[in-house]
Image (spheres, rainbow, N blue to C red):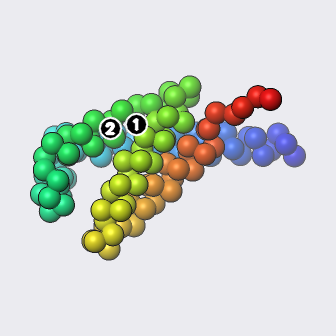
Amino acid sequence: MVETASRKRLIAIRVLRVLLGLAFLTTGAAKLTGSLHTVQTFVAFGWGQWFRYLTGLLDLTGALLVFVPRWTFYGALLLTCTVGLATVLSLTRPPDLWPALLLTLLAATLAWLTRPRRVS
């Protein structure tokens, strides 16, 4: 029974790592290149283009960290913070809220599953 639970946990971690890694590689690249309406989105929020570049770099960094097993927790934590801010900003634009909220929950779940354990 314990083997089955740990196996399911490992499968969940692998699936989340791939999904989040690919999603944030795409998102980060789009922000850095200004594609997929990212320029207009950041203009609408009023934060300026410097913030688009910053979040694009953070997205790419988090995505790359998620792919490295030893650093997955830190990448997932970074992504939870960046997409969590996007979720808060999306509260003013309800149709845009759901994708950001889903990614926040998935990144937080991955961070929880890969958190460092204390050995007593």
Q: Callout 2: helix, strand or loop? A: helix
* Left or right, 69 with reference to 80: right
Q: Residues within 10 Å of mark 1 (few under 14, many from 20)?
A: many
State the image coordinates of residue 45 (x, y, percent, origin top left).
18, 61
Q: Callout 1: helix, strand or loop? A: helix
Residue 66 appears in the picture as rendered: no
Query: Are the two marked residues, 1 and 2, in contact with CB atoms closer than 8 angstroms?
Result: yes
Q: Amino acid at mark 1?
A: Gly
State the image coordinates of residue 11 (x, y, percent, origin top left).
65, 42
Q: Residues within 10 Å of mark 2 (few under 14, many from 20)?
A: many
- In the depicted structure, whether residue 91 falls above or below residue 20: below
Any mark on residue 79, and which? none
How many labels sit on residues? Answer: 2
Q: Which residue is mark 1?
A: 62
Q: Which residue is mark 2?
A: 58
- In the depicted structure, whether residue 3 falls above or below residue 43: above
- In the depicted structure, whether residue 100 falls above or below residue 4: below
Q: Which residue is at 20% across, 40% downward? A: 53
State the image coordinates of residue 8 (x, y, percent, origin top left).
71, 46
